[in-house]
Amino acid sequence: MSVLHRFGGIVAVLLVIVLMSLAMVVAGTSPIDGFSALLTGALGGSNQLGETLVATTALLFPALGICLAFRAGLFNIGAEGQLIVGALLAGAAGAQMHVAAPLAIAIMLLLGAIGGGVWGGIAGWMKARFNANEIISTLMLNFVAASVALTLVSGPLRGPLATGAETAWLPPQYWLPTLIPHTRLSAALVLALAIAAVLTWVFRATVFGYELNAAGEAPEAAKRNGINIARLTWLSLTLSGAIAGLGGASIVTGELHRFNTQLSPGYGFTAIAVALVGDLQPLWICVAAFGFGILESGGLAMQASAQVPKDAIHLIEGLIILVLAARRYVATRIEKGQAA
């Protein structure tokens, strides 16, 4: 079976390349020029690599949170809102604090996790208490989070020198350390990778991980074996939201150094694709996030240098998701056929 998976992976990669080339041809661009611009724009130097890893980090936090919820059979579509709430709390608190720098950074990250956790926990409580559809509740909470954030940073939380809807800038000593000099890449990447490693251990070696997998694969059997599904539902969505909220706080402390309503161009939604492409395996999600980070940062160079339209870049992302999802479907069918 491992041979089939490897062969399927090679076929999927080749098919992605072919489809990306076709998308560029349809857009009126040479695939050679397009791929060259993509790789140069994403990996062509320390600045380009830094921006790619910045996008990777921003996608990795919500993708890991979504992975945790999906493992329990719960569809968390609200990572975008959870990220925004976490970022808002971190930015608002950081602009007002007057404490030692390490403590301030720790408080902002903690508040981000708490904010995202509370936002995810609302949907978890509704699911556990009233069996409310978590897809609808998490999706709707995205709009609530965006509206609340816009209202607050346009009014009481708006920075005194702000030109738009944003909080005051954080003092430089409250910024996360930079990993690559003269880039925006911060230590948030290390934190995200550490969370991926911890989740890998949790899923493989803990009772909680076993309960997550059992609830996701066979909830009725899990319930008969004494697993408290209601409690697990609430806890899963709370922790999922906390990881996404921590990602929002890391954007504030490590990248933008303030909160504004434009801090996320849809990271929480793209992260759903990242989690699925990574097959809900934390370490593979890191690889998938890096791949999408290449598309995010290299896509700008494709637009500028190779004149690939922005819509074509989104089409390419969609084709990648479609191909890898199809590969997963085919692999599952093969496994079922062999089992029979």
Image: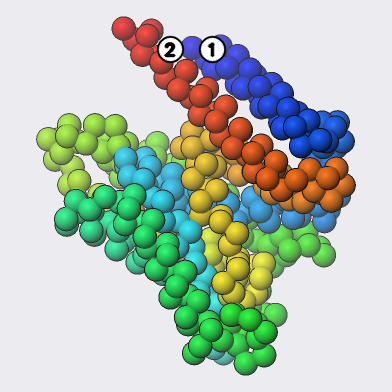
Q: Position of residue 81 (x, y in %)?
A: 45, 63
Mark linked to residue 79: none
Q: Is residue 18 visible?
A: yes
Residue placed under numbered mark 1 in the picture:
4
Q: Give whichever of discs 2 and 1 has the lower sequence position.
A: 1
Please name the residue shown 53% across and 48% down the image: 271
Out of 154 and 185, give the one closest to the viewer: 154
Q: In this picture, is 320 found above or below 152?
A: above
Residue 164: image x %, image y %? Answer: 63, 81
Crowding at label 2, few (<14), some or many (≥20) Cα neighbours within 10 Å?
Answer: some
Residue that label 2 marks: 334
Q: Are marks 2 and 1 in contact (CB under 8 Å)?
A: yes
Residue at 69 percent across and 21 percent down: it is 14
Marks counted in the figure total: 2
**Can you see residue 298?**
no
Estimate the x, y position of residue 194 in percent, counting from the top left: 55, 51
In this view, 96 is above or below 61: below
Image quadrant for the C terminus?
top left
**SS at badge 1:** helix
> Is residue 304 left or right of 260 when viewed as pictured?
right
Pick whichever, 24 or 38, lies toward us: 24
Of 244 and 314, nearer the camera is 314
Q: CA distance from mark 2 to mark 1?
A: 9 Å
Amino acid type at mark 1: Leu
Quadrant of res 181: bottom right
| Relative to 20, 148 lies left or right | left
The spot of residue 30 in percent (x, y) is: 85, 32
Q: Amino acid at mark 2?
A: Ile
